[in-house]
């Protein structure tokens, strides 16, 4: 579904991604790990079309379409979803209005009629149960006054509502206690199917105990320098990144 | 450069007999003082204190006709014009250009409130007692209004009376030629009275109009007033309005000024809080696009101790529009325990739009709590991107953020149905839909 070829990107003139290659197929879970500043969040920002980043080379194909040509909203309609590391608070915009607008914009993109109020409320009720959010959610402003755990659960709730084909979870585990982590991970697992795929960006192996990856990639200095199975994550947990950094810096990878 | 004023003074001097013929005595008495005040008067220049963004000379320059003989110019009749807030049943009155007309629903409130023209009022003693007692002729626009006023609307709520239904006044411009309407309103709430008043400004057609409006409001002891003004006029309509309020002890006043569409507007709000234990809410909202010009100028005088006031004006400016806000809170000597806040928040959504803001506090007493905040900014880029990643297109995301920005001012409306209506109108306005407040539409 997703083919990234030799992707280069900069922010404020500084090159962060220096030739990323990655292929994701339906049903797969990919973990991207790597030390701070290696470009993990930049990769998610570039895939979702964050205007702060400039793509300077390479290509990204999503179901045969040139993803880089699409606006952020059209990427969403095509089925890309990003769970933000730091979900944005939007005072004054209610969750219900926010989600109804998002759903109806997608329906419009596919030439469908807006969803009826009853169907929408039913959908919201069903999906918030996935991540244990209560019925006050609809009338709260987007992320405003949410605890850290609620914000992350709210991300997964939105993912459940929008049913993306490719979900990118950007450090969804950061700032979560064990219980919240389990809730979030269970939510993600319940949404998994053979038709959709997930990219999990994380520092730590512990999230991967819950969300089992098919492949683990190590991103360092803007490139994927190593790819392995779930055992690679365990090895990183034990040994850290220094041995990989050394090999890369000595041009052995 | 002061020719703009001169033409109206000449008009007054030449037509004085005709002007006086129709007007009630209190207006004619004060007219003399207004004429004196304007003798040799100079309109404040653009850029001078209190007129940083607004040029009165330009606004008053066109040779507007003034309907001295009060010929009914409007082709519209009240039966053809509907303006209603759904589910809000109001006692409805019209001012077509400068002519007062009650509607069928007028006076059916079943209470003691009376809404009448100055010329036909059954309470001439109220007019005589209060007319001109709050407005200050040092303000050249108020002096001009007072010099030319021949009629007006008197809203009188006697002691202890509560209106059961809101009073709604719709100002409509509808004439064949460019016209200045001299509009005058006197609102008197006696002690313990309560009223909710909604005033809407509309324009029909594309003629050049100027509304020269002076409103005087007297709020008696422990009386409570909500006064909403909503402008939905046209690009060619100018408005120079001054609202003068005097609050007596224990009174509670909400003034809410909303500008959705207009041409060139300058609103002055001048509130004297004369009694203790008063509550004052002064709210305002402006949404501007094209070349709209909206200038709100406010002054709250705390002349008595132990009162609270809260002021908030919000602007969203698009295209080449200009917004201006100046607000002063003045706490006089020997007025402890004042709790006053003033806020002005603005979103300038286009590189060619301009916002002028000037918050001021002047405090001559210790032991008061006064603060202000003023911001000018753009829409939150992170929030916009967040919404886009959920599939919400950029224009829709911008609209949602602007709507959210206005939500606290909308929530300040104390009439439920008007609040819902306003939310809907703001949404339509921000969508760029032609604003026909569909129920306020002139039926053609």
Image (tube, helix red, strand yellow):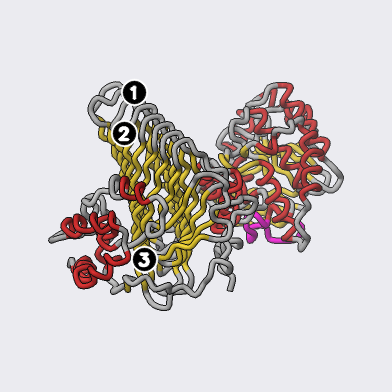
Tell me the subunit letter for badge 1: B
Q: Is residue B350 left or right of residue A145?
A: left
Depicted B186 relative to depicted A83: above or below: below
Closer to the camera in the image, A33 or B256: B256
Judging by the rendered image, the residue that carries numbered circle 3 is: B181
Q: Is residue A36 left or right of residue B353?
A: right
Which quadrant of the view contains residue B44?
bottom left
User: Label 3 is found on which chain of the structure?
Assistant: B
Residue B314 appears anywhere in the view: no
Query: Mark 3–mark 1 contact, CB under 8 Å?
Result: no
Element class at badge 3:
strand
Disc 1 and disc 2: Cα gap in Å?
Answer: 14 Å
Between tags 1 and 2, which lies in front? 2
Marks 2 and 3, how far apart at CA: 31 Å
Question: Residue B331: x, y in percent?
Answer: 28, 32
Choose between A23 and A166: the one closer to the eye.
Answer: A166
**Local secondary structure at mark 2:** loop
- Does B311 appear above or below A56? above
Ranked by sequence position, the earlier of labels 3 and 1 is: 3
Q: Secondary structure at mark 1?
A: loop
User: Which label is found at residue B274?
Assistant: 2
Q: Identify the magenta region.
A: A63-74
Q: Nearer the viewer, mark 3 or mark 1?
A: 3
> At 46% across and 40% down in the image, what residue appears?
B225
The residue drawn where x is 78% and y is 32% is: A211
Q: Quadrant of the C terminus of chain A?
A: top right
The residue that disc 1 covers is B337
Residue at point 28%, 63% (across, down): B148
- Whether A15 is among the magenta residues is no
Residue drawn 81% across the image and 35% down it: A189
Badge 3 and badge 1 both on one subunit:
yes
Task: Check if mark 2's residue and mark 3's residue have beta carbons within 8 Å.
Answer: no
């Amino acid at each position: 579904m997703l083919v990234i070829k030799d992707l280069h990107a900069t922010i404020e003139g500084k090159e962060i991604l220096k030739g990323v290659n990655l292929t994701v197929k339906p049903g797969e879970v990919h973990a991207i790990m790597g030390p701070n500043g290696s470009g993990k969040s930049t990769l998610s920002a570039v895939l979702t079309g964050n205007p702060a980043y400039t793509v300077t080379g390479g290509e990204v194909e999503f179901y045969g379409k040139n993803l880089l040509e699409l606006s952020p909203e059209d990427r969403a309609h095509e089925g890309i979803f990003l769970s933000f590391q730091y979900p944005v608070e939007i005072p004054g915009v209610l969750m219900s209005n926010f989600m109804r607008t998002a759903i109806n914009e997608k329906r419009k993109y596919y030439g469908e009629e807006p969803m009826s109020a009853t169907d929408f409320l039913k959908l919201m009720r069903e999906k918030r149960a996935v991540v244990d959010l209560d019925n006050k959610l609809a009338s709260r402003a987007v992320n405003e006054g949410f605890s850290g755990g609620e914000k992350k659960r709210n991300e997964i709730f939105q993912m459940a509502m929008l049913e993306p084909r490719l979900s990118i979870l950007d450090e969804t585990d950061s700032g979560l206690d064990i219980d919240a982590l389990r809730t979030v991970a269970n939510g993600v697992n319940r949404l998994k199917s053979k038709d959709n795929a997930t990219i999990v960006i994380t520092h730590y192996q512990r999230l991967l105990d819950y969300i089992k990856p098919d492949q683990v990639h190590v991103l360092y200095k803007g490139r994927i320098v190593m790819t392995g199975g779930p055992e690679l994550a365990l090895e990183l947990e034990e040994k850290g990144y220094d041995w990989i950094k050394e090999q890369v810096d000595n041009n052995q990878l | 450069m002061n020719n703009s004023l001169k033409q109206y003074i000449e008009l007054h001097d030449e037509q004085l007999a005709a002007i006086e013929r129709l007007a009630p005595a209190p207006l004619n008495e004060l007219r003399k003082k207004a004429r004196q005040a304007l003798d040799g008067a100079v309109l404040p220049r653009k850029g001078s204190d209190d007129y940083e963004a607004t040029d009165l000379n330009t606004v008053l320059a066109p040779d507007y006709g003034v309907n001295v003989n009060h010929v009914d110019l409007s082709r519209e009749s009240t039966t053809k014009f509907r303006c209603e807030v759904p589910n809000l049943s109001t006692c409805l009155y019209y001012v077509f250009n400068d002519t007062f007309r009650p509607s069928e629903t007028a006076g059916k409130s079943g209470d003691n409130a009376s809404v009448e023209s100055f010329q036909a009022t059954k309470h001439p003693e109220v007019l005589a007692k209060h007319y001109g007692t709050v407005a200050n002729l040092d303000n050249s626009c108020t002096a001009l209004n007072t010099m030319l006023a021949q009629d007006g609307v008197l809203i009188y709520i006697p002691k202890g009376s509560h209106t059961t239904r809101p009073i709604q006044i719709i100002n409509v411009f509808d004439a064949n030629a460019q016209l200045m309407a001299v509009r005058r309103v006197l609102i008197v709430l006696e002690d313990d009275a309560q009223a909710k008043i909604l005033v809407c400004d509309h324009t029909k057609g594309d003629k050049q109009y100027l509304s020269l409006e002076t409103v005087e409001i007297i709020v008696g002891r422990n009386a409570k007033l909500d006064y909403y003004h909503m402008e939905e006029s046209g690009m060619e309509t100018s408005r120079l309005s001054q609202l003068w309020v005097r609050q007596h002890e224990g009174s509670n006043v909400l003034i809410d000024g909303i500008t959705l569409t207009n041409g060139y507007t300058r609103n002055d709000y001048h509130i004297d809080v004369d009694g203790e234990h008063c509550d004052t809410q002064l709210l305002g909202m402006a949404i501007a696009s094209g070349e709209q010009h909206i200038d709100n100028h406010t002054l709250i005088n705390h002349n008595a101790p132990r009162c609270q006031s809260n002021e908030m004006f919000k602007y969203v400016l698009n295209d080449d529009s200009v917004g201006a806000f100046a607000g002063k809170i003045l706490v006089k000597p020997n007025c402890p325990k004042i709790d006053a806040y003033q806020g002005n928040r603005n979103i300038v959504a286009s590189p060619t739009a301009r916002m002028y803001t000037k918050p001021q506090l002047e405090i001559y007493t210790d032991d008061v709590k006064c603060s202000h905040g003023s911001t000018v900014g753009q829409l939150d880029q992170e929030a916009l991107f967040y919404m886009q990643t959920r599939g919400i297109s950029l224009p829709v995301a911008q609209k949602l953020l602007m709507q959210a920005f206005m939500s606290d001012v909308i929530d300040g409306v104390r009439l439920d149905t008007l609040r819902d209506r306003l939310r809907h109108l703001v949404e339509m306005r921000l969508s760029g839909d032609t604003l026909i407040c569909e129920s306020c539409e002139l039926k053609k």
